[in-house]
Amino acid sequence: MKKVLIITYYWPPASGPGMQRVFKFAKYLPKFGWDPVILTVEKGNFPSYDHSFEKEISDNIRVYRTKIFEPFEIYNKLRGRGKKKSIPTFILSKSSNDSILDKAIKYVRGNFLIPDAKIGWQRYIVKSGLEIIKNEKIDLIFSSSPPHSLQLGARKLAKISKLKWVADFRDPWTDAFWQKDIARLKFAKNKDKKYETNVLLNADKIITVGANIAKEFENSTGKKIEIISNGYDKSDFEINKTKHSKFRIVYAGTLGESQKIDNFIEALINLKDEFKDRLEVSFYGTFHKSITDLITLNNAAEIITIHEPVDHNEITKKIVNAEVLLLVIPEALGNEGILTGKLFEYLATNNTILGIGPKNGDASNILMETGAGKMFDYDDDITSFLEDSLNNWILNKEESPTKTNIDKYSRERLTEELSKIFEECL
């Protein structure tokens, strides 16, 4: 069996879509002739943690953990937060509530930690990676980002070892929507772009999650970009749905300031009382203050219940047992290419998906292709959608839309595609 060195910052106890993408690849790769060896961090500072995944790691997977210098630990200290206090993914987003300290930290991050705050891991990737390659007799290098700084370490590791290298991008690099909120000097932008171009040109194969990101990379490099989307693991969704006296709408994950839910809240408020009495709306995850303030100011706190993040196996039960699942794409330039990992887990539930985001985006295309739900723009009125969904539920009509083409997003099938790319690379 051939061996692949997988370089990833996110690995259990980290949680989130980025971790799951690599985690599930590692789970199914042995089925297709590849033995995964993991290179990750010893003590990462993750937006969220989920120790339940640690129980799923096969004993046959070797995991090597290295040191890393984390500048955001200094941020936590300056803000009076605990050293290992998790930092939400929207930390770099522009906010009207930013203090002078917040603005200063974001300025330093944008102009001196290039391409990102994990740049301190690069030297450890190279040092440990070379030892692993020698001891494990590695055949191929696979690196998945963000953080994109790990691609710089992978590039150097591939150059020294002379091994083939496949680079995976879950998000854009310099064209990412959050980059627009960072006050960057010209030299910083140019340096970041140079890093990106160097990585894209030197990787033997490049993979990304959607058509829009692939198009951006192809335009800048002239190289063919492979697309392997995020997906869902069938084994995670072997759950029987329970009946409930309430019509359940669930949101799972992070909501940043750019993820606008104004029209969703307005629709909830506009519902007739007879519908509101049958409704249960639950948000599970981490939420920007602007989101909680919006809910409070609109007197929607009686309708929407905010919950702390829960483990993956628990949130899976919540979304399976919902009638409607809320999906919110950030409102930002370039958001057409945003494909959140939760979309695919939503698909696996066979429940209706209510999307808020660009109607011409990759996520909207998947909803139309699968018949899984509908995407509304940020200013669209979605009251009728909710009323129709509630009416159908009350009348015990078809509970969810008829879906097609869902199986192609299974983690096992996607890993088979990845294994073929590995073989082509060799």
Image (spheres, helix red, strand yellow):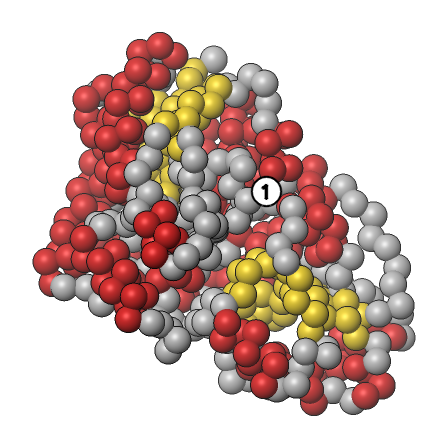
Does residue 63 lie above or below 321 as drawn? Answer: above
Other residues around mark 1 within 10 Å, as few (<14) / some (14–19) / many (≥20): some
Asked if residue 389 can be seen in this view, the reply is yes
Q: Residue furthest left?
A: 187
Image coordinates of residue 78 in percent, x first then y, are: 34, 56
Considering depth in this image, is 20 or 73 the residue closer to the camera?
73
Instruction: Identify the residue at horizontal 81%, vertical 82% (top origin).
Output: 275
The part of the image, by quadrant, that contains residue 338 is bottom left
The part of the image, by quadrant, that contains residue 250 is bottom right
In the image, taking residue 85 as reference, residue 207 lies left or right, namely left
The disc labelled 1 sits on which kind of residue? Asp
Mark 1 — residue? 50
Instruction: Identify the residue at horizontal 35%, vertical 10% (top origin).
Output: 135
Q: Residue furthest front?
A: 80
Does residue 302 lie above or below 306 as drawn? Answer: below
The part of the image, by quadrant, that contains residue 395 is bottom right
Does residue 106 lie above or below 207 as drawn? Answer: below
Image coordinates of residue 350 in percent, x first then y, are: 72, 56
Secondary element at tag 1: loop
Q: Quadrant of the C terminus?
A: top left
In the image, taking residue 354 as reference, residue 363 lies left or right, namely left
Instruction: Identify the residue at horizontal 86%, vertical 55% (top origin).
Output: 242
Image coordinates of residue 198 in percent, x first then y, are: 17, 42
In the image, taking residue 212 as reference, residue 315 lies left or right, namely right
Instruction: Identify the residue at horizontal 87%, vertical 63% (top origin).
Output: 244
